[in-house]
Image: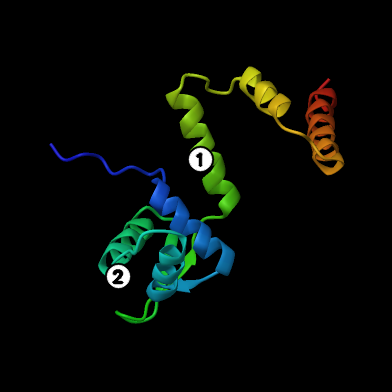
Amino acid sequence: MARKAARNLTERELEIMQIIWATGESRLGDVQEALNRKGDPVAPSTVATQLNILVQKGYLTQTGRHGRYLYVPARFREEATKALLDGFLNRVGLGRSPGFLIQLLRREKLTAQDRAALEEILREESGDEGGDA
């Protein structure tokens, strides 16, 4: 039986998406060059295969003609990050565990902006509940 295609990103796919999110759009050669600067040389055929997988998974759109395709993100970075985090939490059995979030926040040194953003989220949450009463 064939293995079901994963919708989550592999490490390499995430690396490619980070390159394309940073540039807004890229050609195969641009992605290959960026990957080669980061580590071991990667063959164009390998990059092409990974780009095609990202198109099939719905993370990229492909425009142009064969050999000169332009790849553009089809999903925002925030959306992909949320999906990766949700997948991780489900795999380790934490689901929507607030305890995990609290431990994560305790490990970080929060800036004033971070604290203000968290306070805004908490205000919005408490406002939603208070509006229903």
Asked if 17 appears above or below 83 in the picture, the reply is below
Q: Which residue is drawn at 84% across and 33% down?
A: 119
Using the rendered view, name the quadrant where residue 47 is placed.
bottom left
Q: Which mark, by number, is residue 83?
A: 1
Q: x, y percentage for residue 127?
A: 84, 29
Q: Nearer the viewer, residue 58 or 111?
A: 111
37 left or right of 81 in image: left
63 left or right of 44 in image: right
Using the rendered view, name the quadrant where residue 41 is placed.
bottom left
Pointer 1 local density, CA inside 10 Å: few below 14, some 14–19, many at least 20 = some
Asked if 43 appears above or below 54 in the picture, the reply is below
Q: How many marks?
A: 2
Q: Which of 5 and 100 is in front in this view?
A: 100
Q: Residue at x 57, y 52 (%)?
A: 77
Q: x, y percentage for residue 85?
A: 53, 35
4 left or right of 2 in image: right
Going by the numbered disc 2, the residue's amino acid type is Pro
Pointer 2 local density, CA inside 10 Å: few below 14, some 14–19, many at least 20 = some
Nearer the observer: mark 1 or 2; the answer is 2
